[in-house]
Amino acid sequence: MKFEPLHSWNLTPQQAIELQQQLRSQVVRRLDFKPARIKTIAGADCAFDAKGVYGFAGVVVYSWPDMTEIHRVGRRSKVTFPYVPGLLSFRETPLLLAAFDKLDDLPDLIMIDGQGIAHPRRMGIASHIGLWLNRPTIGCAKSRLIGEHAPPTQKPGSTVPLMDGDEQIGVVLRTQRRMKPIYVSIGHRIDLPTAVDVLLRCGGKYRIPIPTRDADLFVDSLKKTTTS
């Protein structure tokens, strides 16, 4: 599947920072679709070889709301951008786009293992992917990049705001009792209540929701198969 290019990838780190500042205003931080129209949902993730020369991107697609896996695609590509904190989407997004390109149809909603607007410049990988594909996206991260928060209660489904100064940039969500919470943020074209509802409805019995957990396991298997 081909999609309109958002920008060139031939950028220096400083140019990438400037581009993030430009793109942040294009992120839609509200629900601009009817949730009942969601028929497919996907999880996406990346992994890298030991030398950081090649990246492995995976997308796992499910029917919604029954969460039956219907398709998965993987792609091995050469890494073209250095590892720079805060600019990881410029390293990973090209890999993921190459994987999404192998799909016949884009999923209706995409869950990314990473940050959305919970990012110093409000332009994490979930927002970046959302703008490229013009799809609702959710940032579902295992660790915090920025922001402060109180601890959520141990009750599964409990949340607390993730704040950067006076601005709420996400929520901290407890998915399972006695397990670390996850960090949820708007990627693009969605709001936080809907994002949390989707994550809880496809959570399963693990800390990480099924779509991003399966994508993580998938890219790890791709890496092991290729490098073994």
Image: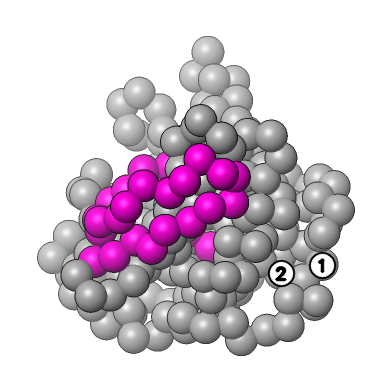
The location of residue 95, given as percent across then percent down, is 48, 50
Q: Which residue is mark 1?
A: 39
The disc at residue 132 is: none
Left or right of 2 in this view: 77: left
Question: Of helix, strand and loop, which one carries label 2?
Answer: loop
Q: Is residue 189 above or below residue 181?
A: below
Q: Is residue 46 above or below residue 128?
A: above
* In the image, farthest residue toward the left: 14
42 or 209, nearer to the observer: 209
Residue at the spot 61% in from the left edge and 86% down from the top edge: 32
- Specify the amino acid type for callout 1: Lys
The magenta stretch is 138-164
The location of residue 197, given as percent across then percent down, is 65, 62
* In the image, farthest residue toward the top: 228
Proximity of marks 1 and 2: CB atoms separated by less than 8 Å = yes
Residue at the spot 81% in from the left edge and 60% down from the top edge: 64
221 or 149, nearer to the observer: 149
